[in-house]
Amino acid sequence: MFERLEALPADSLLGLIALFREDSNPQKVDLGVGVYRDEAGHTAIMSAIQKASREHMETEDSKTYIGPVGVVGFVEGIKKLVLGEQSSAIQQGHLAAIQTPGGCGALRVGSELIRRLGDELTVWVSDPTWANHVPLIQSAGLPIQSYPYFDASTGMVNFEAMDEQLAKLGPNDVVLLHGCCHNPTGADLSFEHWQRIAERANKQGFIPYVDIAYQGLGDGLEEDVKGVRYLSENIQEMVIATSCSKNFGLYRERTGALMIQTKSATEAAAIQTQIQDVARANYSMSPAYGGHLVDKVLHNDELRREWQDELNAMATRVKSLRAGLLEEINKRDIAKDFSFITQQKGMFTYLGITPEQVSELRRDYSIYMADSSRINVAGLNTQCLGYVADALKKVCG
Ligand code: LMR
């Protein structure tokens, strides 16, 4: 029977990992998958996470099921990390929330919950968006459409075009927004844009669906969520999917959370049973380990400080790599204007070069990036900036 199904090509982004590994060029540069790397190209375990892990190993005395919510301290901590200690939704009990297997798990459960709201709902994603948004949302049975977002001529958001589309949406629409550090473009909404979106959501009745996977890797832990918090305080209903892969470095531990903001505590209690039911039907319960570690880090002053310092250092390093790359590019007088590199936020920059130029960089210079020309800035290091700029000069002229 299985002959009915054909082999599929490798995932275009994850497939880069294998291609890069097989490349024997000593100068190869991996700017593909969004993973933070240090100057030596290593993705180290964050020191606060190491400490929490050791403590957890010594104190955990059972592996019995933990319950449908996941690690309760983790879920409570993440709610506050994203929405703030003073969040009205938290204080009024308007939030339903569960731990999920990574941000992908949160997006899948969130999408299935939205599907349960009715047949008519459509999810709108930015053009472009993270490649895996589409299969995650579609496989939950939801139709997808896209709204204009990125302005290739400036490397920034074309908010006028986005807003024009939002103005046409209504109560059967769900709008997926990147909380910060837009993936793949690095072009973020300004605070004024978030205010406008809140106004639109209230007027038109669409539901914002925020994916926030890079909190702390843009302008800082608090700064990066200003827009999301504004939205939460100024509208009644929204969905938030969050991930601890990048800001806690827990990639393979699949640690994330889903939060649903509702109009009342009664609704939140009902939605809580719904998201637990969706999770149960998919994977029963989230893996607990990553949640325990984040719980420990967030609720121990010393570990929390250590984690924040390390996260700030990571964000600062990414910013300095952006500046360094632009400096090298500018020295080479390349025809294309790359000045947007230092204006974009987070780990990604969309170079805006053609698929042929992306292939040429891979084939002739062993520089790996997503087909869209998205680069993971954290994959650069001070040693390779000149090499990458040289290669860009060669392919872009
Ligand atoms: C990325 O965008 O590179 C990361 O989020 C990793 C992934 O799963 O795609």
Image (cartoon, helix red, strand yellow):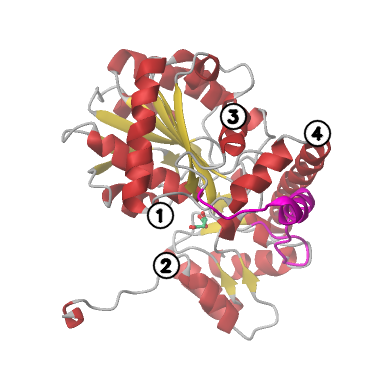
Indicate the position of residue 9 as horizontal and vertical percent values. Answer: 34, 74
Q: Amino acid at mark 2?
A: Ser
User: Which residue in the structure is indicated by mark 2?
Assistant: 12
Of the residues shown, which amino acid type is indicated by label 4? Asp
Of residues 87 and 128, the one nearer the viewer is 87
Q: CA distance from mark 1 to mark 2?
A: 9 Å
Give percent across and percent down for residue 17.
54, 72
Label 3 to label 4, Cα distance in Å?
Answer: 21 Å
Q: What x and y, as percent, mark residue 397?
A: 57, 65
Q: Are marks 1 and 2 in contact (CB under 8 Å)?
A: yes
- C-alpha separation, residue under disc 2 versus residue under disc 4: 41 Å
Label 1 C-beta lies within 8 Å of the nearest ligand 1 atom:
yes
Check disc 4 and report the residue beneath it: 301
Q: Is the C-beta separation of discs 1 and 4 under 8 Å?
A: no
Q: Earlier in the sequence, mark 1 or mark 2?
A: 2
Magenta residue check for 79: no
Residue 226 percent coordinates (x, y)? 59, 24
Query: From which residue to which does the magenta span run?
Result: 36-65
3 vs 2, front mark:
3
Q: Secondary structure at mark 1?
A: loop
Q: Which residue is mark 3?
A: 225
Which residue is labeled 1 in the image? 131
Q: Nearer the viewer, residue 78 or 323?
A: 78
Please report contact status of discs 3 and 4: CB closer than 8 Å, yes or no. Answer: no
